[in-house]
Image (tube, rainbow, N blue to C red):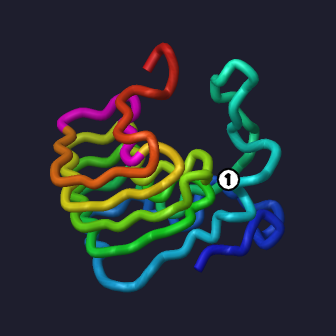
Amino acid sequence: MAPDGPDSWPKNVTKKQWLVFYRVNGMSMRGGGVVDGRGEKWWNLPCKPHKGVDGTTLPGPCDSPVALRFFTSSKLRVGELTIKNSPMFHFRFDHCNEVHIDSLHIIAPPHSPNTDGIHIENTYDVTIQNSIVSNGDDCISIGAGSYNVDISNMTCGPGHGISIGSLGMKN
């Protein structure tokens, strides 16, 4: 279980991610149980992204953590897990390749901001299948530098569905 809100995190420690896997090759993360990101206290912070008066989303300077981040890793298999209530993205894959995601269940309330289910960027050769994402933001977000992404048999909603290239004008 993650720390219970911003005040429970160790001082002078980055809050950008809770669990990080860096330079991992050939890892499999599978099994039962529930990973609880305990994000409720993060969602209502005034620095979280919010709707502007014209309906656009305005950024916030929060340092809300991603629940599970995989960075510069390859040959990853993630599945048969339930993860809920991340302060920000539930899963983030950055600079990874050969990622296989199967049978995940990702849950957060519809009002939870920026709680993308699976976010990938600069990542290639990705399979995402047989999973359910119910959250307050993107079910799956595919950022800049990602390619060869195969998504099948997904249930998304409520939430914003699958987004591709939503990180700004130049991405």
Of all residues shown, which one is farthest toward the top? 169
Q: Residue at x 73, y 37 (%)?
A: 60
Q: Is residue 69 visible?
A: no
Left-right relation of 38 to 6: left
Front residue of 7/16: it is 7
| Residue marked by disc 1 | 64
Q: Amino acid at mark 1?
A: Ser
Q: Position of residue 96 (x, y in %)?
A: 32, 48
Q: In this view of the protein, which residue sits in the foreground, 117 or 11?
A: 117
| Mark 1 residue element | loop
Is 94 situated above or below 169?
Answer: below
x, y percent for residue 119: 41, 46
* Quarter of the figure with residue 10: bottom right
Question: Quarter holding the N terminus?
Answer: bottom right
Instruction: Residue 58 in the image: state x and y as whole percent.
Output: 69, 28
- From this view, report whether residue 26 is shown above or below residue 118: below
In the picture, measured across the screen, residue 76 lies left or right of residue 51, that is left
Q: Residue at x 22, y 64 (%)?
A: 102
Instruction: Reply yes or no: does residue 95 show up in magenta.
Output: no
Q: Which residues are magenta?
A: 139-148
